[in-house]
Image (spheres, rainbow, N blue to C red):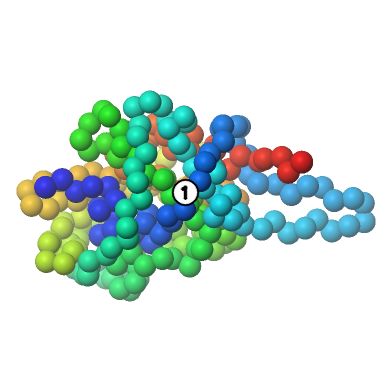
Amino acid sequence: MRVHTTTVLSLTALTVMALAGCTHGSATSPSPRSSTTVPVPPDGQSAPAPSPLSSTALAKRLLDESDLGEDYTRMPQRTAAHDDVTVIGCPALAKLGDAAVNGASLALPRKAKASFTYAGGSDSELSEELYSNAEDKLSRSVDRIFEAMTSCPTYQVLAGSTPVTVTTQKVLVARRLGDEQWSQLLTFAAGGRSSVVKQTAVRTGMVLVVVSGSPGLVDAQVRKAVAKATVVRSTG
């Protein structure tokens, strides 16, 4: 049977990013990318410290069909349901703990998510997750998960009673998209079938963008996702 992107991600520790957000919201037109900035205060006053974006604000920065094109259809959010998952053959990933492996939420409360299907093929799914928090916390959270997942080229997970073989590989992002970026390819094999998922995460300031799905779709849309998620909007 085919492994859906969202199901695939729920079998690994990356679920803490990929399945944590379930906030919906309308999006505005994309604008040139820039990190969130703080207005210049009057002379003699200290600049206010920047603060993370709310989940509502993040939801407005998600890609939608008007950004992606008519071949994309937004998928309804699936109810979170996590089978018991056991990692075999990857101590670093297992050390993240049962909560991470089974898809419990990472300590990043400000988040939003959208998922899409693409008319170009049966394995064409794309999901986007946005998070906002202090820069160092975002960096540590993503580093920890990506390092754990790519530390073992091959391992197995048991999702309930179903064995899934996972192969991971770090990949380079073709262009610099933000302050930090991570990317990996994951191949999942179960029941004689396999599915390849690409996951690219980009941090720009206090915003983290995670785009997952069919490798071709991720490569085509990640730059647009970062641009929209990190745009500076007027407060006037």
Q: Please state which of residues 70 and 191 is positioned toward the viewer in this rendering.
A: 70
Q: Please state which of residues 82 and 97 is positioned toward the viewer in this rendering.
A: 82
| Residue 136, placed above or below residue 130 | below
Question: Residue 14: in sight, yes or no?
Answer: no
Within 10 angstroms of label 1, few (less than 14), some, or many (20 or more) residues?
some
Q: In this rendering, would 31 be left or right of 182? A: right
* Residue 147 point in image, percent of width and height: 37, 60
The answer to which image quadrant residue 163 occupies is bottom left
* Residue 235 point in image, percent of width and height: 73, 43
Question: Residue 115: in sight, yes or no?
Answer: yes
Q: Residue at x 50, y 63 (%)?
A: 108
* Residue 75 point in image, percent of width and height: 34, 42
Which residue appears farthest toward the right when viewing the image? Answer: 44
Q: Which residue is mark 1?
A: 24
| Residue 101, placed above or below residue 204 | below
In which quadrant will I find the C terminus? top right
Which residue appears farthest toward the top when viewing the image? Answer: 70
Q: Residue at x 41, y 65 (%)?
A: 105
* Residue 79 point in image, percent of width and height: 32, 58
Q: Residue at x 62, y 57 (%)?
A: 52
Q: In this rendering, would 16 be left or right of 87? A: right
The mark tally for this picture is 1
Amino acid at the residue labelled 1: His
Q: Residue at x 7, y 48 (%)?
A: 192
Element assignment for label 1: loop
Q: Please state which of residues 43 and 139 is positioned toward the viewer in this rendering.
A: 43
The answer to which image quadrant residue 85 occupies is bottom left
